[in-house]
Image (cartoon, grey):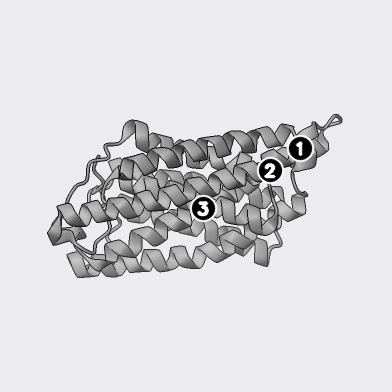
Amino acid sequence: MELLLFKGSLLFNSLAAAFSLLYMWKNARFLEKGWKILLAAGCAAHVLSFFARIANFWGLYQENRYFLPINTFFGALSYLALVTNGTCLALAWKYRISVLGAFVLPLGLLAQSSVWIWTDPALSGLVPALQSYWINIHPLILMACYGIFANAFGLSAAYLVQEWQIRSRRPREFAWQIPSLEVLDRLSYKIIFLALPALTIGIVMGGIWAWNAWGRFWGWDAKETWALITWMIYIIYLHLRLARGWQGRQAVYINLLGFASVLFTFFGVNYLSKLHGYLSG
């Protein structure tokens, strides 16, 4: 049932991404509403799939009951895709930015399709170091922040496209679908401003978990170091924006750098980290 729901979610999300990209070139009401409805159905199926995976995990590993199965690439990357897509849907509906899907859903779809193609869906029991209630809090908060930052990246990408269109002597038709530079810049700042405190809390919780598990709060492991670098980039983003008044393209470039650091922190560091190399599959 879990994999059936996951495949259904992948199908709905693929159609949603296609509809959102088509909407960029054709201002059709059915495309605008269609991709949101399809994405809502995809997210609902994805949530049910995640709960089915939890039920299977608890049934298979009684000693890991009440812990979440995010100790594999399948579980972790699936959760990241869900947060990315869900945040995109919420932002598009709340702020009526219907082109957001064209810039964010390809990222969510890439993550979810990578889960299906390259990772093993088999469940795996938790190693002793992960058998802690912190696994239900610390990684979920961090990955949720990464999904939100993916949406900030999408808004920044839309900003650059719109700026290019404005400077062009012959703007394409889809330029009229994209909100103003001010709206894109302000919303990107808003969600980063809201996500950064959560990222801070998630990192601190990781330090507390490390203290309980290894007797030290910080060990400069590769994962810890790059999580700190990511945090510092977004701190610099907020500082320069609030203290120096950086907006527009300057802020966009720092945002893009921050998301590049997010990607390396989540994917690249897994091959360098000794203490955080627990993801299997």
Q: Are marks 2 and 3 in contact (CB under 8 Å)?
A: no
For label 1, the residue is 27
User: Could you tell which of marks 1 and 3 lies nearer the N-terminus?
Assistant: 1
- List x then y, in percent, for residue 104: 57, 43
Left or right for 54, reference 93: left
Q: Quadrant of the C terminus?
A: top left
Disc 3 packing (10 Å; few <14; some 14–19; many ≥20): many
Distance between the alpha carbons at the discs numbered 2 and 1? 8 Å
- Residue 21: x and y in percent read 64, 34
Instruction: Give the mark nearer the N terminus: 2 vs 1.
Output: 1
Q: Residue at x 46, y 66 (%)?
A: 198
Q: Residues within 10 Å of mark 2 (few under 14, many from 20)?
A: many
Q: Are marks 2 and 1 in contact (CB under 8 Å)?
A: yes
Q: Amino acid at mark 2?
A: Glu
- Name the residue type under label 1: Asn
**SS label for mark 1:** loop
Asked if residue 98 lies left or right of residue 213, the reply is right
> Is residue 169 at all visible to an observer of this figure?
yes
Is 151 drawn above or below residue 14 in the view shown? below
Q: Residue at the location (44% across, 38% down)?
A: 10
Q: Position of residue 232 (x, y in %)?
A: 49, 59
Q: Which mark is residue 32?
A: 2
Which residue matches tag 3? 86
Q: Are marks 1 and 3 in contact (CB under 8 Å)?
A: no
Tell me which amino acid carries mark 3: Gly
